[in-house]
Image (cartoon, rainbow, N blue to C red):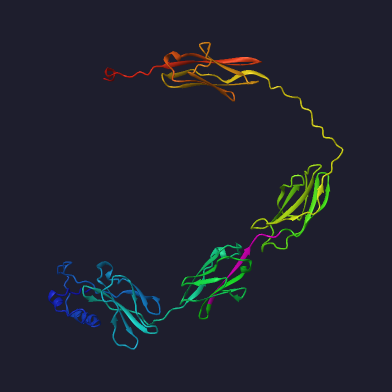
Amino acid sequence: MPVNPATPPEAETALPPADTVPSTPEAPAAETTAPEVAPAPAAPAASPEASPKAPLSPPQNLTVHDVTNTSLTLKWSTPESAVDSGLDGYCVEYCKEGASEYVAANTELITSNLFVIKNQTTGDSLNVRVVAVRAGERSEPASLPNPITIREVPDHPRIRLPHLLRSRYIKQAGDQINLVIPFSGQPKPMITWTKNGQPLDVKKVNVRNSDKDSILFIRKAERDDSGTYQMTVKIDSLEDKATIVIQIVELPGPPTSVKLVDSWGFNAALEWTPPKDNGNTDITGYTVQKADKKTGEWFTVLEHFHRLNATITDLVMGNSYSFRVFSENVVGRSETAAVTKEVAKIQKTGTVYKPPHYKEHDFSEAPKFTASLSDRAATVGYTTRLLCAVRGSPKPKIEWMKNQMIIGDDPKFRQNSNLGVCSLEIRKPSSFDGGVYTCRAKNPYGEATVACKLEVKQVVVPTEEAKK
């Protein structure tokens, strides 16, 4: 293979500026001069500083990233020849269709591979190209094959309905409704709302639209606000719709009627009918209550009951009862109830109740210690306490002794017995308070004792000589 000789330094200095060098004659010149030069295989290799750089290739993959009604965004990749050697930047140029000269869109070189040509007029068509620049050298331009029209590209309208609103949306009467429904689309779509196929009542329902979402707002919901709401997002002939079913519920009314069907023994049978007003939702159950005519107080006997009849049992003989029934739904229990007109009278019978005879248990027991005293060691001047536990019936009498001598009411000692736990508190003992302490428990059925040894030690303060 023939080797093209390196260009002499004099030839490099004689080159005109990069702006004025034609882009096409370079390759043919190399082809015509190459045969005139003889190969020089024995010539020494030129140093890296003297070898010429490869020609700067144009940017790659020039594409349109975005188009609006006032701008055009371009995106490209780095030239292949500049991956290792680096670049000074890029120059973006455009030429309006009908004009003959390209205009630079950037006043200074940019290093980013993304550029926005701004402040354009809607409807203009632009021919664009991107040139890579390195040390005053300009690459061949990378151009788009066709002119680009400045216009707003329609984006299909789409409603992003929140998951919560895809099923029936239930709220209580008096609550506030604030539904935010996001959407997308370019240019800005037209938003319309309907309720049951009719326009919204602006006195009760407010709608606020932005570029990204639409808000349906009801300050204080009423049952009449229930219905099927439809949101439509439209751009020209393209549209998207979303349907939201709103249900406003409240407390139900009471059952229409309730009557006493029969009463026998200790039982009463009731029947009732569903309420006329279910609160705009299903009835989930009933609450049944009874009241004794003597006291007039109501007590719940059945709750969350699903049937329309019930038998009330365990009524008291000789009493008369009234009954009432409440309706229930998801909101709660009806404010009022249906009350029986008749009274259920539980008749007395000739049967006399005889309580069973039980043999009385004898709980008498001699004193017995369940927890004995333990030997203790105390320090002079520090209060200590002795503890034990005893049982017996009747309650035994407790006596404390020191060295077999009854302590009595000595103020130095504090005696206490509570629920079988016996304690003796020795207040600030001295070395003379050591000895054998005994607790004795007595009742008519016997007595028991426990004892322990208490040692009171003197605190030893080390002297200066001992410390040394």
227 vs 158, nearest the viewer = 227
Rendered image quadrant of residue 32: bottom left
At a point 78% along the width and 42% down the height, the residue shown is: 316
51 vs 338, nearest the viewer = 338
x, y (%) of residue 300?
A: 71, 48
Quadrant of the frame with the C terminus: top left
The question of residue 364 being in magenta is answered with no
**Which residues are the magenta region?**
239-253
Query: In this view, which residue lies farthest toward the top?
Result: 404
x, y (%) of residue 446?
A: 64, 14
x, y (%) of residue 156?
A: 49, 75
At a point 44% along the width and 13% down the height, the residue shown is: 432
x, y (%) of residue 276?
A: 73, 63
At a point 30% along the width and 71% down the height, the residue shown is: 80
Residue 283 horizontal side relative to residue 13, left or right: right
The question of residue 241 being in magenta is answered with yes
Quadrant of the frame with the N terminus: bottom left
Rendered image quadrant of residue 354: top right
Q: Is residue 12 above or below residue 226?
A: below
Q: Is residue 250 above or below residue 28?
A: above
Q: Is residue 269 above or below residue 45?
A: above
Dominant secondary-structure state across the stretch colored magenta:
strand
